[in-house]
């Protein structure tokens, strides 16, 4: 660069192309030559020119080393191989000679391509080669015509184009000569050749021949000779496959090009190549599959080829890079439910669990295991590995306030299984979890504890020691997410020995609960947990009375009106009413002082089955204790069950001939002029008409007989005597299932053939 002209903010530049600069160049002589030939550089700048040339000479190696360290996951460039290693040193100025060699016999073509490859491996020469259309055209022609005649020749030429493919700006020239499509044809052909070689080798290795003639040295030598030849062919073939696949991987940066490859069955070729033993080739193949696996169509092709069975042999393996990239491919595949099932079936679960102890693979292995743990069928299988002790150790040794997201998410899933929870709580497990959760106010850790608390049995009784600590967190001062999990945990503690009245009074929870029931006072998630909490404490007689006196029932009805479209809210509020009508102190309040029964009648035929169950059970209790509501409930049930019949009868105009079908007494011409339910002579029972005096026994409904083809359980008000809609006796009510998770007392039965 020269000094700027006076008054102009521009610089004059002169580009000097150094064609002969390499590791062996004499820098001092080259610097003198540059200064002599370039009139813009003053002789006094000779030392600076030498310094720049020295920098250029060493720049590429240093940058390559840095890139290698930063991108260890990227497959390495193919190493030198037979046919490429020649004694001659290539020179960019002799390109014309090398091109001429491409028009000679195969050995000369191999030599010419090897010399051009030497130049192409230096990125500084690529632009010079790019403008030499004759050379590129000749190389493409020779590859197209002679690739079957020499593996070395095909490998050399593909390697030259691979050097161009390493830079996105050169992809156009590769596409122009259709090198990608040619490479796919070559790969397909070579894979088929390999299958033929294996068949031929298998024939010569037949056990019966070797056993029948154990002393026949000719057969043994023939087999050994064939095997040695096979090994040599495989080595050369794998070099060709590696460089061709790497070129395609680089071209696949463009998704349109990748789609073309997919249409030519690239996935099937890659999965076939997984049977090889060459680590470097396998790294490349798995890397390519990982890139392709993010598209569903490619993933489906991999499923057809049983890819998981082929990948399982690589976990674990001695080669660190191969294991790492294989785990990443498995992680991509684990988003598919069917492939997760396959991973478990082929025995990947204990292998991945063993990798949790290795810092290099821990993160990826944990993510795959997390995906597997999302399926309820597989949660229990973790109890038969050493996974849970390892996870607990990681939790307690985590130095940060918040546990890693992958780790805690995995633990939350595992805590949804009863057997896993028993292992988690062994020793001081629960105590340590509670201590950490309360210390750091971690909502996700508390969510894990909440999952633990939902399981009946000895683990639930462990929470009695922590009821006070959890109740102390229920306040407006704490983070809302944390309070939600604490409330959810308390709501799960349906323990007969727990004095809820003392807890409510000691920690002044009643005003807090009532305040949060006001529509809009808090986020819906928190309000829902408050309702569930009220349902739990209402199981206690004294608590139910305490809540009723505080005016919580009207607040619940107001909330029911506000959230009537939300099935979860409706179901849990009705469950609170269900608990309240069990107790004498609150039953009268519900029945006589509120409109709760009317709401329950409206919801009796809701489209949600869970809501219908709770309504039916609550209304049955109300009907037992209040005759007036019993008639209304009975009437509504009759209307619903016979709605079609009633509609038909009420809308029908009877003609004169039909009026006498029922006897000699005339009846009004329009039967619907009066209330149809005031016509007891139209009521049917199993034995015929009910007496016209209208004295219908309540047993008519409770002892309902199936008729007219009804199936057991389909009738809206059929139920087992003495058993509520949850399959439990009325004395031990069960909470309805919530969207948060399954009911703790609901049994799960799984079979591997289910999905």
Image: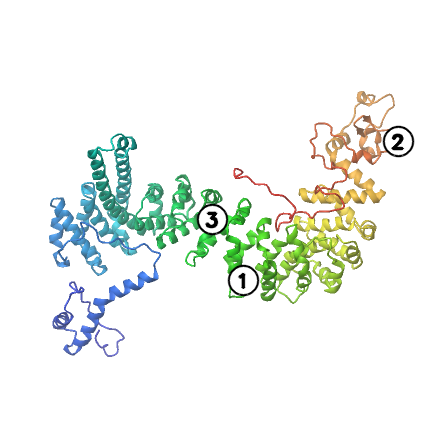
Q: Give the side of residue 730 with respect to residue 59, left or right.
A: right
Query: Crowding near pointer 1: few (<14 within 10 Å), some, many (20+)?
Result: few
- Residue 193: give x, y in percent of width and height: 26, 38
In front: label 2 or label 1? 1
Residue 545 in the image: x percent, y percent? Answer: 80, 56
| Cα distance in 3D space between marks 2 and 1 | 75 Å
Q: In this view, does 351 lie to the left or right of 75?
A: right
- The residue that label 3 is drawn on is 350
Q: Are marks 2 and 3 in contact (CB under 8 Å)?
A: no
The vertical placement of 372 against 62, above or below, is above
Residue in view at x 39 percent, y 40 percent: 305
Disc 1, SS? helix
Image quadrant assignment for residue 213: top left
Q: Nearer the viewer, residue 417 or 19?
A: 417
Residue wearing tag 2: 693
Q: Name the residue under label 1.
A: 396
């Amino acid at each position: 660069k020269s000094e700027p002209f006076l008054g102009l903010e521009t610089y004059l530049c002169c580009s000097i192309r150094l064609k002969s600069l390499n590791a062996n160049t004499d820098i001092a002589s080259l610097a003198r030559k540059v200064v002599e030939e370039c009139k813009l550089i003053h002789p006094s700048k000779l030392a600076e020119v030498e310094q720049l040339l020295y920098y250029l000479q060493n720049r590429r190696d240093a940058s390559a080393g840095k890139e290698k360290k930063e991108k260890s996951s990227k497959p390495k460039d193919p190493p030198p191989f037979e046919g490429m290693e020649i004694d001659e040193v290539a020179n960019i100025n002799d390109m014309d000679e090398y091109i001429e060699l491409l028009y000679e016999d195969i050995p000369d073509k191999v030599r010419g391509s090897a010399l051009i490859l030497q130049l192409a491996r230096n990125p500084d020469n690529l632009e010079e080669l790019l403008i030499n259309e004759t050379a590129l055209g000749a190389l493409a022609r020779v590859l197209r015509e002679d690739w079957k005649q020499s593996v070395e020749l095909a490998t050399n030429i593909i390697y030259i184009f691979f050097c161009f493919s390493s830079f996105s700006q050169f992809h156009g020239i590769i596409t122009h000569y259709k090198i990608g499509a040619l490479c796919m044809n070559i790969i397909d052909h070579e894979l088929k050749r390999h299958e033929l070689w294996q068949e031929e080798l298998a024939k010569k290795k037949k056990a019966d021949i070797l056993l029948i003639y154990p002393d026949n040295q000719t057969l043994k030598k023939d087999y050994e000779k064939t095997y040695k030849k096979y090994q040599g062919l495989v080595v050369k073939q794998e070099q060709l496959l590696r460089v061709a696949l790497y070129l395609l991987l680089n071209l696949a940066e463009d998704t349109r090009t990748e789609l073309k490859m997919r249409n030519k069955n690239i996935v099937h070729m890659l999965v076939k190549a997984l049977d090889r033993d060459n680590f470097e080739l396998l790294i490349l193949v798995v890397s390519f599959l990982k890139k392709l696996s993010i598209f569903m169509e490619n993933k489906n092709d991999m499923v057809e080829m049983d890819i998981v069975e082929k990948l399982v042999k690589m976990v674990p393996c001695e080669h660190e890079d191969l294991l790492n990239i294989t785990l990443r491919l498995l992680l991509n595949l684990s988003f598919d439910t069917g492939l997760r099932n396959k991973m478990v079936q082929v025995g990947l679960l204990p292998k991945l669990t063993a990798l949790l102890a290795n810092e290099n693979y821990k993160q990826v292995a944990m993510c795959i295991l997390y995906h597997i743990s999302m399926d309820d069928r597989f949660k229990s299988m973790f109890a038969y590995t050493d996974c849970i002790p390892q996870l607990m150790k990681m939790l307690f040794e985590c130095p940060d306030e918040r546990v890693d997201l992958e780790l805690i998410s995995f633990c939350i899933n595992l805590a949804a299984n009863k057997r896993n929870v028993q292992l988690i709580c062994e020793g001081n497990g629960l105590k340590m979890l509670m201590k950490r959760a309360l210390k750091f106010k971690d909502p996700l850790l508390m969510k894990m504890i909440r999952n633990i608390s939902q399981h009946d049995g000895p683990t639930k009784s462990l929470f009695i020691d922590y009821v006070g600590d959890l109740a102390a967190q229920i306040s407006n001062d704490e983070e809302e997410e944390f309070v939600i999990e604490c409330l959810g945990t308390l709501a799960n503690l349906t323990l007969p020995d727990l004095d809820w009245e003392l807890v409510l009074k000691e920690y002044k929870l009643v005003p807090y609960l009532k305040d949060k029931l006001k529509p809009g006072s808090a986020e819906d998630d928190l309000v829902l947990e408050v309702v569930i909490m009220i349902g739990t404490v209402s199981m206690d007689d004294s608590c139910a009375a305490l809540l009723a006196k505080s005016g919580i029932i009207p607040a619940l009805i107001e909330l029911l009106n506000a959230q009537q479209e939300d099935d979860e809210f409706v179901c849990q509020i009705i469950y609170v009413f269900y608990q309240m009508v069990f107790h004498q102190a609150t039953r009268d309040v519900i029945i006589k002082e509120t409109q709760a029964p009317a709401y329950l009648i409206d919801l009796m035929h809701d489209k949600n089955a869970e809501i219908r169950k709770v309504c039916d059970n609550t209304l049955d209790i109300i009907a037992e204790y209040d005759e007036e509501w019993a008639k209304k409930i009975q009437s509504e049930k009759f209307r619903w069950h016979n709605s079609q019949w009633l509609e038909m009868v009420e809308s029908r105009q009877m003609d004169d001939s039909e009026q006498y079908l029922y006897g000699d007494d005339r009846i009004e011409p329009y039967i619907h002029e009066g209330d149809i339910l005031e016509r007891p002579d139209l009521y049917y029972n199993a034995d015929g008409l009910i007496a016209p005096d209208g004295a219908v026994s309540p047993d008519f409904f409770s002892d309902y007989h199936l008729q007219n083809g009804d199936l057991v359980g389909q009738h809206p008000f059929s139920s087992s005597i003495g058993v509520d809609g949850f399959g439990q006796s009325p004395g031990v009510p069960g909470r309805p299932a919530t969207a948060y998770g399954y009911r703790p007392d609901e049994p799960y039965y799984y079979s591997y053939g289910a999905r």
